[in-house]
Amino acid sequence: MLSISKQYLYLVVDQTNKCVLTNTSSASTANAVSAGIINSSPMVIWFPYLDNDHNIIRSNIDENINYKLVKQSKSGRSLTDWNTYDPVEKTPSGRKFDLIEMDSNLIDSQWINRRKLANFRAQLMIELEGICERFIAKSVTSCCDELLFPYLQKQLELSDPDKDLYSPGLKEWASINNLTAKTAYQELKMKYDSASINLIRVHAIWTKFVNKFNSISLEDNVTKQQLFAKMETQFMFGDV
Amino acid sequence: MKSLIIGTTFSLKDIIGQNTDLKIFSEIFNLTRGSWLVDRTDTTQLPFKTDLLDKYRLPDFDKILNLTLEECCQNRALELMSLDKRIYFLYSGGIDSTLALIAFIKSGIPRRNIVVVCNDHSIRENPNFYYSSIRSHFDVMATELFMQQLKTQLIDGIILSSEHGDSLYGNDYSSIAFELLGGKFLEKPATKENLITFFCSGGLSYQSAACWLDLYSANLKLCPRVIETVYDFLWWIGFNWRWQWCGEKMKLRTALDPDIQTFFSSDQLQKWAVTHKQIIIEKKTDFKRDYKQIILDYTKDQEYFDSKVKHVSFSIYYLANSYLAMESDGTKLHKLDYQLSKYYQKDNFISNWLNSN
């Protein structure tokens, strides 16, 4: 809510060689792709890529562009996320994390296939998340929803319209809007229920399709178009 | 052979195969996605056996009073109020549901007798009306919560939607024709050439267009409205063929058999649809101007009258794993139980048309 966009890269890294399988648009999509590829990890790094000379974004459509993730670390220090990067004394850019070209000896057909699968799945997850966010956006009622909703839930639960009892927060909201507490209760409950139910539905569809996409391999020869053909229908009617 | 009341066509493309009648049948859905077409005159059968429910037969229009739209709406509101049941009114904020709610307000419905089922989207559709006439005046409930409860719980009262408002006015198909060919086209005479042009513009092949034109024309002699223009013809096919679908489709959202009614289905309102003078549609905002005039008279909201455009309500708010069909005995079918091919009848209008053309 109050966060600004940061220059993060959302990577999926191969744990065995610390090379980048793919990069996505968010932590959730990186996690989703990683969940479907054995021996991979999601990794978020701050990386102002406009200052750097590399093609990490293009590598999503070109499996011949390959990078390894490195981290500048002093020897002997214990490392977190150790399975996602190689520690080096100094990175080329001098920043904590950097991408270096992958050792060409490691690039074989097995690696390229692994990259292709990761890139294909990343595209699917990014598109799926885009659709989910399009529907979530319809439920956003104000800039403070994320902080408000847990408190609002409590205020609604503390109220009892049958006994004409209303919580302090609800009474204050009513007063500011020149409404009775009963009207305020009904309107806020309506908005809360509406947004919450929409969100749980979107989350259910997200979960379902992440699992579905992660069960598809390149050999299945399924196109993105085929996979998304019934997506809108899912949001309207459920599983048909 | 079992028959349907309503069905859905999600699996249609899987069973078309070499059946030319099904191919022609499928092409109409380029124009009207999602509808299950049923002939209210009960004289024409499509490829999938479907029964017409008695309540959806065309009424005897000679026996129905000819009233203004406002009178018809008032009478419908009073009729529903006289049932003395709580009404759960599905309010999208669109033109039809606003008009219907105004009819209840003008009829003096007590607050305890109606719950306005809406959400934030309904408010955005017509904020002035929400803040002036709903908030503080009616109990409200989230659409999503209501639909979730409707799925498995018996609702104590009438569930009232504003379905049939489109079919009554004739904009099921005419708004599509307006988008494809412009307003002037709607005023053209209902000739074969003009109607084929419409169907072909909507993505039908010439053969399908010719077949559907003959199919839709087969019962024209039973049409209660004089068909002169393209608009008249398109009004008839919506009014005749989509009526049962509009009345029954909400039932696919629940496992039970609640009292679901539509506001715009009274005989008097149907009579109005048959007899009123159709205004000329020059721009999108002209659709439903008769409806909007009553809203304007009540709200004095000139901007809404001048600018509001009719559009389809979002249905994500209704999301639930719907049933896909309902058979004549009331059995509702989920995806796994619904085999569209089971209802296929070789002897249907389209296959007979193919044999004779």
Image (tube, rainbow, N blue to C red):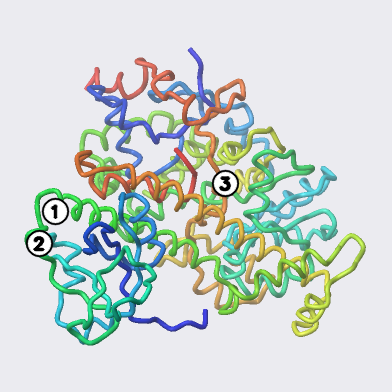
As drawn, which residue projects farthest toward the right? A163
Give percent across and percent down for residue B74: 73, 55
Question: Which residue is nearer to you in this view: B137 or B174?
Answer: B137
Q: Residue at x 33, y 38 (%)?
A: B28
Report the amino acid beneath label 1: Ile
Q: What residue is shown with label 2?
A: A64
Question: Which residue is nearer to you in this view: A153 or B284?
Answer: A153
- Element assignment for label 3: loop
Residues marked 1 and 3, same chain = no
* In the displayed structure image, the side of residue A202 where residue A67 appears, left or right: left
Name the image quarter holding the C terminus of chain B: top left
Chain under disc 1: A
Report the amino acid beneath label 2: Asn
- Element assignment for label 1: helix
Tell me if label 1 and label 3 are in contact, CB under 8 Å.
no
Regarding residue B82, the answer to whether it shows in the image is: yes
Residues marked 3 and 2, same chain = no
Which of the two marks, 3 or 2, is nearer to us in this view? 2
Chain under disc 3: B
Looking at the picture, does residue B163 appear above or below residue A198? above
Q: What residue is shown with label 1?
A: A112
Looking at the picture, does residue B355 appear above or below residue A220? above
As drawn, which residue projects farthest toward the front? A76
Q: Residue at x 58, y 48 (%)?
A: B163
Regarding residue B45, the answer to whether it shows in the image is: no
Q: What residue is shown with label 3?
A: B164
Query: Crowding near pointer 1: few (<14 within 10 Å), some, many (20+)?
Result: some
Q: Which mark is residue A103?
A: none
Give percent across and percent down for residue B350: 32, 24
* In the displayed structure image, the side of residue A165 where residue B192 appears, left or right: left
- Element assignment for label 2: loop
